[in-house]
Image (cartoon, coloured by chain):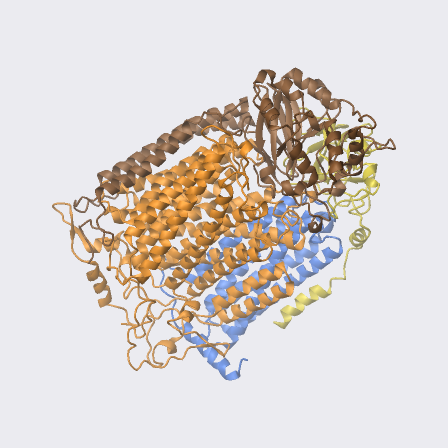
Chain colours: A orange, B blue, C yellow, D brown
Amino acid sequence: MAIIERPAPGTTVPALTPAAPAITPSRTYGALRRPVATTGWKSWLFTVDHKKLGLMYGATALFFFIVGGLEAVLIRLQLAAPDGKVLNADLYNQMFTMHATTMVFLFVMPMAAGFANYFVPLQIGARDVAFPRINAFGFWCLLAGGIVVNLAWFLGGAADGGWFMYAPNSGPVFSPSKGVDFWTLGLQIAGIASLTGAINLIVTVLNMRAPGMTLMKMPVFTWMITVVQFLLLFAVPVITVALFLLTFQRSFGAQFFDVAAGADPLLWQHLFWIFGHPEVYILILPSFGIISEVLPVFSRKPLFGYPFVVFSGAAIGFVGWGVWAHHMFASGLGPVSVAVFSLATMAIAVPTGVKIINWTLTMWGGKLVFTTAMKFAIGLVVLFTIGGLSGVTHSVAPSDTQQTDTYYIVAHFHYVLFGGAIFGIFSGFYYWWPKMFGKMLNERLGSWNFWLMVIGMNMTFGPMHILGLQGQPRRMYVWTEARAGEGFFNLGFWNLIASIGSLILTVGIGLFLINIVVTARSKVRAPLDPWNARSLEWMTSNPPKEHNFDSIPHVHHLDEFFHRKYEEDPTTHTMREVASAEDVLAELERNADKHIHMPSPSYWPLVLACGMPFVALGIIYSIPVAIAGGLIMLYALYGWALEPATAPESDFDAPSSNGHAVGASHG
Amino acid sequence: MLRPATVMRLGHHMADTATHEAHVTSTGLSNVKLGMWLFLGSECLLFGGLISTYMLYRGRVSNGPTPEQIYDIPFTSVSSFVLLMSSLTMVLAVAAAHKKDDRGTNLWLTVTALLGATFVGGQVYEFTAFYNEGLGFTTSLFGSSFYTLTGFHGVHVTVGIIMLIALVAINKRSRVPGSKSETVEMIGLYWHFVDIVWIIIFTLVYLIPV
Amino acid sequence: MAGAVGIVAGGIAGQGAGLRSDLAEAAAEGHFLHRECGEEKSKYFDKKAMKTISLRTNPVAIVELRDGVLSAIMTGFNEPQKIVSVPRGNPVTFIFRNFDDAERRMVASLGTAMAAGGEASTEKEGHSDSNETCTQLIPRGAEQALTVTYAKPSIAQEDPLTLTVPGVSGQAIEVVVP
Amino acid sequence: MNHRDSNETPAGGRLSVARVKAHRFGQRALVATGAIALLGSCATNAPQDTWQPKGPNAKMIDDLQQPVFAVAGIIGIIVSVAIAYVIWRYKDRGQPIPEQTHGKPALEITLTVIPALILAVVGVFTFRVIFDLARTDDTQLVINVTGQQWWWEYDYPVQNEWGITQPIISSGQLVMPAGTKVLLRETSRDVIHSYWIPALNGKRDAVPGRIHTLRLEADEPGIYAGQCTEFCGLSHANMRMEAVALSKEDFASWIANQQAAYQTPAEGTLAKEGEAVFLNQCVRCHQVDGLKRPDGTLAIAAPDENVWSGAAPNLTKLMTRNTFAGAMFDLLRDACRDDVWKADSAEFGAKYLAGVDEACLNVNDLRAWLRNAPEVKPMYANPALLTETNGKYRGMPNLGLSESDIDKLVAYLLTLK
């Protein structure tokens, strides 16, 4: 066993081996002691452990999910009846802008980052990510960005230009409140989190795979996350340019979108959507990855056409760069470019179709067990199909000129985002909860949660197809009785249905929160392998030790864990169980590595990330504050540069030993 | 705050960690190098966005001087030459680092930093001269996009200079020669990238007539 | 370290020196705003004229001077027009293309009502308050953009608002601002 | 205790077979009703129904759109049925762990090529319709449309073949001849708006600094509702418009009436006092062609000094239109409005040209608007909060008119026909 075993959170602390040598942590700037706390809030604040960071990403994302959800309910209450009085026009504009921004940038992306941070190292048999401190910095940046974006609520009104903030309406004249400034600078900071996370995870996946795990033996979830990180790597800089242009226009009087100086507002649209469309694949591919893990496990058979699913994921990522102008069919591009982007958008439906076919064929001939995770996965396949098909109907440019900016588009992207991304995320919750917390979420509550969400989702977003085809534009803060029309498809009735649906959805998600509390209090420990799973992350204890694997497993097959538990009986071609999960884990623990030195906690990621909100507030209010923020960042950068990633030997072993660290990593 | 005693121990710690040989990786590239290449890939998109904004707006001058009236090609060519030479000295620094010749590395790093500073000094002078000659940041679309593009590049060069100087300072203290060779190579990659971006910017902004 | 900071400081210190006199004068006297729109080349404004623009999508009209005839090509009209209707109080962009052998410029008259103290609706410094604005003198085959805002309607002007080319007589595009 | 073969879900107890069936059937029912509802929507519904084309351009889009909806519906049903079958057929009934098949490339490729072919076919038709809708060479009448914060302005440039000898400016309702290829040249004065009459064609954004063209044509005379569909700020929801199609003769008489000279109301009448109130209050922004000041000079409105977008609706022939304030309110009382809106195409023209008279005037909305406009329609018209726009309004401010002034103004506005 490692000399120093750092207790994982939540488990009882094993007695320290007696007479451990005194720890003399290295110092930075000659004065600052490096943090060494292994339990309590300090261990969370300065952690660099990918599992703790993954949990913090998840908790932050869940909080913002609730904030975004409340914003959505307020919108639906305003539109439930004609001449709604719940929100006035200005508040309504802020509400839908912040609902979209919170859900996209502060819930789905961080949640995907949370799952990725927690499970990618585990799935590829690594002990941590390539650059642990950058990973911590990424999380604190995300939190800082989220706070800055939402700070606007309390300081004169949040951003009110729609989540894609078209110029000139986002200019200083047309949205005078500070909301857009907070939005711009908050997303810049969150953008840094995505960019650093992307570099981190790509290097981890490419460089730190277990011996024997070739790219085509990697779990599909890790594949999808890698594609997402490449999309992030190249999409975030483009929106950084767009946001800088907008900040210079709003705060320093530049003329980028000032038509009187000859500018063209479509520049913003192009820059935003070149980021925007890869962004929506960034939102959906992690959920594709999750259900590509969940479906085979509960069908008791491998994923159908693994290479096809992987290449179609990569194809979606690649072609995703060539379709951005399908958001701009009605904004006056010439017929040639409209035709080209219309065809490219149709082309991207093909790899998505491949995925849906493969999921269905995975279940074909399987032995289906309907746990809540499996229900959410099947829910994704069905609802995403509906969303994808409604998407194909407006990839046809002429019909898109009838449908764009109406509720039909709102219905489309809620079917693919709620039905797709969020159902995938919930499937991931129920599937990996035992792995993360050692306890299983209650299946009965889970089933109610699933059914209320399915019914609520279809009741809320189904009628929006009808509202859209009846010509109700997006972002209308009020609709009037006079123009609602009679007949079966009038706006009044279906707006009411949608609002009721959103309340059912709220109850459904409320049940999930209750489920979390119930599980946290229950004493029932989850078995080591509750779902008879197939991939590497299940070859660790629940929750995994801080160094994940006692010895890094040598990988021979895709679904390595399954192949260690089962062997094919050559005569009858049925699978014979040869080892239980406990045996597999015990074998790993038997020949554990000696000196496992995990990267040491550090102050600097937190301090560096804390400098950024001050820079943002400074740009908005007073430059000296920005300079002060800049100095904090410079101080933190120096501290970070002078601090080695893994505390030197003297921290771990007695100075005399010349142990050679295995698995320690730079960064 | 840096008491001499701790400085010595600091140096000791620096040397200590370098003894780990690079963690064996699946692709053979070290984590830091692969990370730097990915970062440079994303920087291409950043400068791509800025360059396309400039190329779009360079013809729209509602007020203030036009590009060809304001540009002083000879002066900028000299400062561009200086930046190109700094890439040469950077290569020499990386070579010296691989040969574990700390003195040579520090020398060439300092020369690179000074050449870089000359370039930035020239750019600061050019900006102040243009400002006084009527091209403000808010004068015209050409002004806004020119200052943004060249300003972003200037900031990247300045960050490069700070990294070079910091590296020289750290190198002087560490007693194990060649302990920082990989870091020198990383800053070399960054510096060459910033240099190549300037070649593209210089050609598109200054040389192609409006 | 001190060397680097010194050099950069030198750049800042040198800001005063070495200014090109004509540019400094032009900036001081605001020649870029109050442009001399005559037929001959003005000392400051017409030096090294811009010959191409990259942003040329969907302007209100492309005004071409081709073998002595000035005509406006507008999206939505199949043959060149002589009258351009432009909404009032709205920045509009004309693109002037010169296919004449001599160097020509396009002048947009902004009308007397404008000059009589009625400033443009958008107070950007880019808007001259003299009663005309123009492009630089550009050679054959070159094109230049001109963004104009007509604050007052045509009926408020004594003489109609026009787009003319100094030196080419009898050719004028009438700009109707309802 | 972890399970291998038993299909017992560990904690939640055994899922009864019935509940699993219900689980799937519920989901299928929802999808089916959605699909049927979508396909069967022919009843007259909301005025902006995109599935009720009334002009060749919209019909062209509809002919392309309906098959794509049908194909999508069929594929949706196929996939749902397949999944339902799989769920029912391969449910865990205690069978052994199935054979670990990894996939059949042949099946994969065929199921990839089939959707690709379907999309290729759809693509070919899309191509043709895109280019047909972008044509500008066969149009007969050009109208300039300008959007600004929260109302639409129409400028009919001089076109002698239609009898337009001087530019005609109107707002709210776009009057056009039926059966004629009309071309709109759209631009905007402030932010991006989008002009959309669902019954006649798709939408096209009005982007400041650019001119975009949109083809409109109505088969029958009638009134076709539309709305701004690109988010443009506070009153985006209240920026509406209607396209009014008249027969060629009615259109000619409308044009003639629009260009008719201005008659100042008779002396001593309430309307005359209204004209005086108009001259000292409203003419700062609103233009009435031909209106003279007491000293005989033409009253030229100066919205560029008071309104940020530099324009305010032209009220020359206000009462020939039957909506106002960005077509948010009707000038006609409900009864008269339904009479015009629901008139069949034959006698619609006459009814529309009748315009608004005293009996049919929707007095309460007009008076509420004149009394305090920003209260009934959210606009940036609070004098204290105009620093960003250098003291200029975005929308009509509260002029603080007395009730008697309002009576006079209403009487005067009624004469603008």
- The residue furthest front is D404
Q: Can residue A69 be seen from the camera position used here?
A: yes
The spot of residue A240 in percent (x, y) is 55, 53
The spot of residue A611 in percent (x, y) is 54, 65
Q: Can residue B30 be seen from the camera position used here?
A: no
Q: How many marks?
A: 0
Q: Residue at x 18, y 50 (%)?
A: D6
Front-most of D166 and C103? D166
Front-most of B201 and A550? A550
- The residue furthest left is A571
Q: Residue at x 53, y 82 (%)?
A: B3
User: Is A21 above or below relative to B140?
Assistant: below
The spot of residue D264 in percent (x, y) is 80, 26
Q: Residue at x 51, y 59 (%)?
A: A147
Front-most of D53 and D290? D290
The spot of residue A61 in percent (x, y) is 43, 56
Q: Quadrant of residue A205?
A: bottom left
Quadrant of the drawing holding the N terminus of chain B = bottom right
In the picture, measured across the screen, residue A627 lies left or right of residue A61, that is: right
In the picture, measured across the screen, residue C135 lies left or right of residue D201, that is: right
Q: Quadrant of residue D141?
A: top right
Quadrant of the drawing holding the C terminus of chain B = top right
Front-most of B99 and A514? A514
User: Is A17 above or below relative to A519?
Assistant: below
In the picture, measured across the screen, residue A204 lies left or right of residue A622, that is: left
- The residue furthest bottom is B5
